[in-house]
Image (cartoon, rainbow, N blue to C red):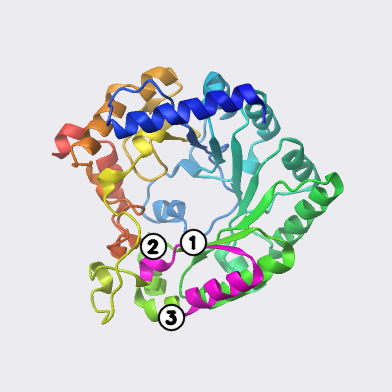
Amino acid sequence: MLPQLATISEANQQLNSQEYLARKIELSSYPFHIQIGADNRCNLRCPFCLAAAYREKGFVHLQDRRLEKNPVELFERLEPYMKYWKYLSLTGPGESLINPELGRILTLVRRASECVVLITTNAVLIDARLAELFVEKRVDEISISIESLKKELYESLRVNARFEAVMAAIDLVNETKRKHGSELPRINLTPNFSRRNIEELPDFIRFAHAKGVSAVQATPTQVYRRSWVKDSLLHYPGLTRRYALMAEKLAAELGVSFANELRMVYLNRGRGLLSFLKEREAVDFPTEPSLCQKPWTSIYVEPDGQVRPCCYLSPVYGNLYEKSFEEVWNGSEAQSLRAAMVSHYPPRQCRHCYEFNRDDPSIMIQLDFEHLEEAAAEPLPADR
């Protein structure tokens, strides 16, 4: 890591932490956790995706909008601030590998920052050129979205994907790393689980061990379509717990890092759809929306230029095609959100956030997401 860039990034993060603890509304520090989708389009049509629910209800999702500009321009506008970054996640509404300017984007980032770079992908498009690019530009992690290790089930959940292509992509990245003597990028698997695939969870741990995959992150599928409600793990807390604990034990034995986000299905405070459980365990992580640090530490930039504090349906700060980053980061919308958090009265869309409602797992079923979209557009004072 270049000492100068490291010092700038670390100093910014330290100042940011101080300003968060002081509950400052206007900030002198900059966000250090950045999430930007390198493209809005997706090459797949997964039935459990929010975009599929939009199409079903007649809405136009960002995946289906024609952008006038390539999102590479957003990275060019943000280049002066990259020295402050510590983490960059190329994760958005679409498939980042679709963008033909991905190499240019990674060059921009590596010219200005030594931040940790994560790319989330369905891996279908990974070929020899991209594998070489990942190693050359020191991408730290490739996070692969894959819901089954069975060809038929996988291709029914990841429509338009080829199972063999994903398996080949994992091997190709590993081979390219070996060729260059590189430990990077690490490969992670990030399956979403429902009743359709929960029994495969231990198999993911075994597969990760066999393939040299660093980590498995198990997440419950969030339901946006009525036809998927019956498959939600909320109806199967005992089954979910059994396979999650099996996976935890197996991961410890095999040395695979396992992030068990399925706990919210079976650890609860007796609220929501799980109130019928006889035995309840308290969650061991914060669940109060006003504790959220993202309005101080993070930004999520959509491929159309809209900036939010996070990738959930949070308030929009502004658009980078219309305002400078300084105007967005310390603008009235951003300051209003921080003030709302400080006053312990976060806006409606934050109170519905998946991340901070883990003591009420019913948040996993959001069939009325269009109302959250409407709420995201409301000014904060009107929400009080």
Residue at which label 2 appears: 223
Label 2 sits on a secondary structure element that is loop
Mark 2, Cα crowd under 10 Å, few <14 / some 14-19 / many 20+, is many
Residue at which label 1 appears: 47
Quadrant in which the C terminus appears: top left
Label 1 sits on a secondary structure element that is loop
Tell me the kind of residue under disc 2.
Answer: Val
In which image quadrant can residue 220 be found? Answer: bottom left
Q: Is residue 261 magenta?
A: yes
Tell me the kind of residue under disc 3.
Answer: Leu
Q: Report the front residue among 279 and 378.
A: 279
Q: Measuring 61% from the left and 44% from the top, which residue is drawn there?
A: 119
The stretch of residues the image draws in magenta is 242-265
Q: In this rendering, which labeled residue sits more in front, label 2 or label 3?
A: 3
Label 3 sits on a secondary structure element that is helix
Residue at which label 3 appears: 239
Tell me the kind of residue under disc 1.
Answer: Pro
Q: In this rendering, which labeled residue sits more in front, label 2 or label 1?
A: 2
Q: Report the front residue among 207 and 316.
A: 207
Q: Report the front residue among 133 and 230.
A: 133
Mark 1, Cα crowd under 10 Å, few <14 / some 14-19 / many 20+, is some
Q: Measuring 75% from the left and 41% from the top, which residue is drawn there?
A: 135
Distance from disc 1 to disc 3, alpha carbons, whole Å, reads 23 Å
Residue 224 position, x and y percent, is 37, 59
Question: Mark number for residue 306?
Answer: none
